[in-house]
Image (cartoon, helix red, strand yellow):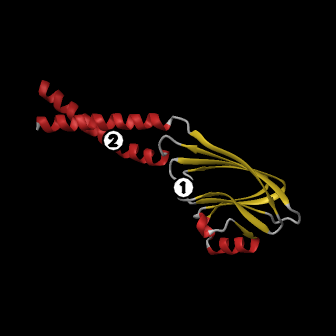
Amino acid sequence: MRMLSTILGRIGTSILFVCLALMILTYIPPMCVDDSIMAYLLCPGYYFNVARCCDEHGAQMELEIRISANGTFNVYVVSVCSDRLMMNGTLQQLYEFIEKSPGKVLVEYVGNTFEYSIKEAFNTSVIVANKGESALLVTYRVKTYILMVPYSRVKTLIAYLMPLGITFIMQWILMKIKEKE
């Protein structure tokens, strides 16, 4: 029994230190790996896909998008893989897509500037549409950041393993106290 208690105590200590190391890693700021600025002439009645984040992006990627234009535009942040949505097309095609999958639209915005951060950029597309009467010169900047560890996954791991490690350590400490008595 004493040997099992010692083994569990050491396992608990290891689990606790791994959780603490993961907590420290979540505080390391993300590193910018790509920063691109582009412009696009958007004709009336058309849309285009600014950020197509599919299989090449994952849980450790984060995108920061800034869009501005010389007029009013509509932005849709859609949770769908980009191969289901064309790079550009007519508004009619966009509306048909939105009608088929209404729950996929995460953000809908109207204005002349737009800023958005996508955490864990996976299967997300940012679409800019021109409902106006004149062509728009749309400039957009997409910054890609890489995280040291994917925060949401690590948070879940820490939430389950930390109490387990503490439990293993506490039973070992209680066993040591009983041995001294």
| Residue nearest the observer in this picture, 109 or 169 | 109
Q: Residues within 10 Å of mark 2 (few under 14, many from 20)?
A: some
- Give the label on residue 163, or none: 2
In the image, residue 90 sits, relative to residue 19, either above or below, namely below
1 or 2: tag closer to the N-terminus: 1
Q: Position of residue 48 (x, y in %)?
A: 72, 63
Q: Position of residue 111 (x, y in %)?
A: 80, 55
Quadrant holding the N terminus: top left
Q: Residues within 10 Å of mark 1 (few under 14, many from 20)?
A: few
Q: How many tags in the picture?
A: 2
* Residue in view at x 17 percent, y 34 percent: 6
Q: Is residue 103 left or right of residue 1?
A: right
Q: Amino acid at mark 2?
A: Pro
Q: Position of residue 177 (x, y in %)?
A: 18, 27
| Residue nearest the observer in this picture, 119 or 174 | 119
* Residue in view at x 56 percent, y 39 percent: 30
| Residue nearest the observer in this picture, 176 or 125 | 125
Q: Amino acid at mark 1?
A: Glu
In the image, residue 138 sits, relative to residue 176, either above or below, namely below
Q: Is residue 42 left or right of residue 51?
A: right
Q: Is residue 22 left or right of residue 13?
A: right
Q: Secondary structure at mark 1?
A: loop
Q: Position of residue 15 (x, y in %)?
A: 31, 38
User: In the image, which is nearer the foreground, mark 1 or mark 2?
Assistant: 1
Q: Secondary structure at mark 2?
A: helix
**Residue 181 seen in the current view:** no
Quadrant assignment, res 35: top right
In the image, residue 173 sits, relative to residue 67, either above or below, namely above
Q: Which residue is mark 1?
A: 56
| Residue nearest the observer in this picture, 64 or 163 | 64
